[in-house]
């Protein structure tokens, strides 16, 4: 049995823990500096081969070794990704400070979950093609806001095309996308032009207020430096 392990966006991976299991067989080894491994003189039969390395997603393959032949198992490992984090509600005033842009948006299309490298961290997220209906605020680092932008939501559950929100977002230059500042916490739903507001730290905004009224009330709360 032999094979090689590589990283999806780089080259060979040394030091990967390889486990080979079969009938009366349980062998373990590490890949060498070239990401290769080899185990000789295996009896014919089916084997399960696993490749494991911290911070990467484990991969396993079923390999059949024929009589007089050498089985092969090559692997391409993916960095382990954050599926979805835990989010802390720092309060509305914190949200107004942390957001680089506050936008009224409508989602028009949703992608399949994908891997994104943000601030040297791998996350699983869904890309949303988004129409910008109006802009409340743009900070100096808020990117170039056009009529259509993209917003990535962490995790594997996306928002629905047609949904409208007041979105508190940050620009992520590494992926050329926006992300909500605290997951879904500072995504304020809008139904039929009216906000669904369940916060208590902005007493001048209520569920049923029009988007324009809510945006005006938020504008009055913006930090002076903006």
Image: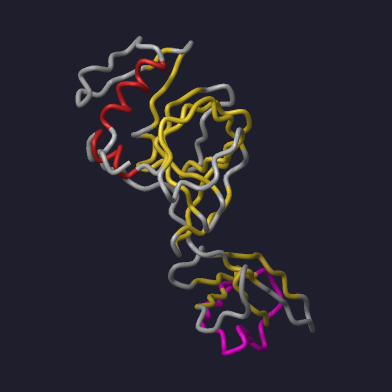
Residue 208 sits in quarter: top left
Looking at the image, the residue that sits furthest to the front is 225
- Residue beneath the point at 63% across and 85% down: 36
Q: Position of residue 71 (x, y in %)?
A: 72, 77
| Of the pair 49 and 115, the residue shown nearer to us | 115
Q: Position of residue 60 (x, y in %)?
A: 59, 65
Residue 55 sits in quarter: bottom left
- Where does the magenta region start and end? 21-46
Is 195 magenta? The answer is no
213 up-or-down from 53: above or below = above
| Of the pair 87 and 23, the residue shown nearer to us | 87
Q: Quadrant of the C terminus?
A: top left
Relative horizontal placement of residue 38, taking residue 140 as reference (left or right): right
Is 45 magenta? The answer is yes
Q: Is residue 1 visible?
A: no
Q: Quadrant of the N terminus?
A: bottom right
- Residue beneath the point at 37% across and 23% down: 215
Q: How many marks?
A: 0
- Residue beneath the point at 26% across and 30% down: 221
Q: Position of residue 30 (x, y in %)?
A: 52, 84
Q: Position of residue 34 (x, y in %)?
A: 62, 87
């Amino acid at each position: 049995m032999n094979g090689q392990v590589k990283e999806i966006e780089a080259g060979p991976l040394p030091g990967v823990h390889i486990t080979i299991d079969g009938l009366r067989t349980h062998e373990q080894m590490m890949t060498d500096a070239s990401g290769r491994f080899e185990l000789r003189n295996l009896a014919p039969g089916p084997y399960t081969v696993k490749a494991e390395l911290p911070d990467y997603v484990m991969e396993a393959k079923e390999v059949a070794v024929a009589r007089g032949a050498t089985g092969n198992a090559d692997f391409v490992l993916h960095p382990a990704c954050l599926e979805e984090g835990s989010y802390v509600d720092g309060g509305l005033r914190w949200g107004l400070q942390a957001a680089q842009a506050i936008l009224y948006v409508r989602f028009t299309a949703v992608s399949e979950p994908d891997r994104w490298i943000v601030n040297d961290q791998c996350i699983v997220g869904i890309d949303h093609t988004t129409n910008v209906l109006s802009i409340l605020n743009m900070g100096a680092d808020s990117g170039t806001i056009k009529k259509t932008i993209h917003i990535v939501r962490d995790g594997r559950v996306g928002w629905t095309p047609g949904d409208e929100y007041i979105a508190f977002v940050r620009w992520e230059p590494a992926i050329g996308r926006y992300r909500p500042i605290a997951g879904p916490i500072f995504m304020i739903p809008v139904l039929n032009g009216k906000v669904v507001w369940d916060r208590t730290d902005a007493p001048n905004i209520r569920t049923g207020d029009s988007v324009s009224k809510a945006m005006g009330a938020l504008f009055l709360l913006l930090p002076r430096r903006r």
